[in-house]
Image (cartoon, grey):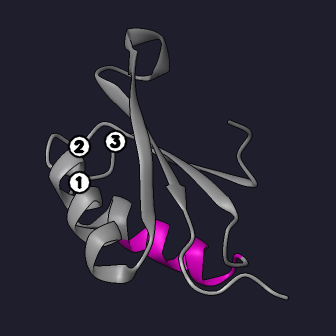
């Protein structure tokens, strides 16, 4: 799935990956896709909660392994809200 925007949050600790994703999503249109790469252990739970409470859709996660900066995970998020008519 092609991303409209990619955000690298490797090395950042909670709550920074979610805060940066929230800022990026505010600048995006409803329905657009954001990919976030994060290494924070709490990111899995944090992004699930963030999407559920913020009206976004967590499309999935991908373990990226050591080549992406350690135990990195990519989160695929569809921005919520109403798409333009």
The residue that disc 1 covers is 13
At which x and y percent is residue 73? 37, 32
Q: Is residue 72 left or right of residue 1?
A: left
Q: What is the distance, in whole Å, between disc 3 and disc 1 at their CAs?
A: 7 Å
Q: Is residue 61 above or below residue 24?
A: above
The residue that disc 2 covers is 40
At which x and y percent is residue 81? 57, 85
Secondary structure under tag 1 reads: loop
Q: Verify whether residue 26 appears in magenta.
A: yes
Q: Verify whether residue 3 appears in magenta.
A: no
Secondary structure under tag 3 reads: loop
Q: Quadrant of residue 4?
A: bottom right
Q: What is the distance, in whole Å, between disc 1 and disc 2 at their CAs?
A: 5 Å
Secondary structure under tag 2 reads: loop
Between 16 and 81, the residue placed more toward the observer is: 81
Query: In this picture, which residue range is highlighted in magenta?
Result: 19-28
Of pointers 3 and 2, the one earlier in the residue sequence: 3
Q: Are marks 1 and 2 in contact (CB under 8 Å)?
A: yes
The residue that disc 3 covers is 11
Q: Who's the residue at 38% across and 73% down the image?
A: 19
At which x and y percent is residue 71? 28, 22
Q: Nearer the viewer, mark 3 or mark 2?
A: 2
Residue 68 disc label: none
């Amino acid at each position: 799935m092609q991303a409209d925007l990619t955000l690298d949050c490797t090395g950042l600790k909670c709550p920074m990956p979610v805060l940066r994703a929230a800022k990026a999503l505010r600048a995006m249109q409803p329905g657009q896709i954001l990919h976030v790469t994060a290494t924070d252990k709490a990111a899995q739970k944090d992004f699930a909660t963030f999407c559920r409470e913020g009206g976004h859709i967590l499309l999935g996660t991908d373990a990226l392994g050591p080549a992406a900066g350690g135990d990195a995970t990519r989160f695929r998020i569809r921005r919520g809200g109403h798409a333009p008519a």
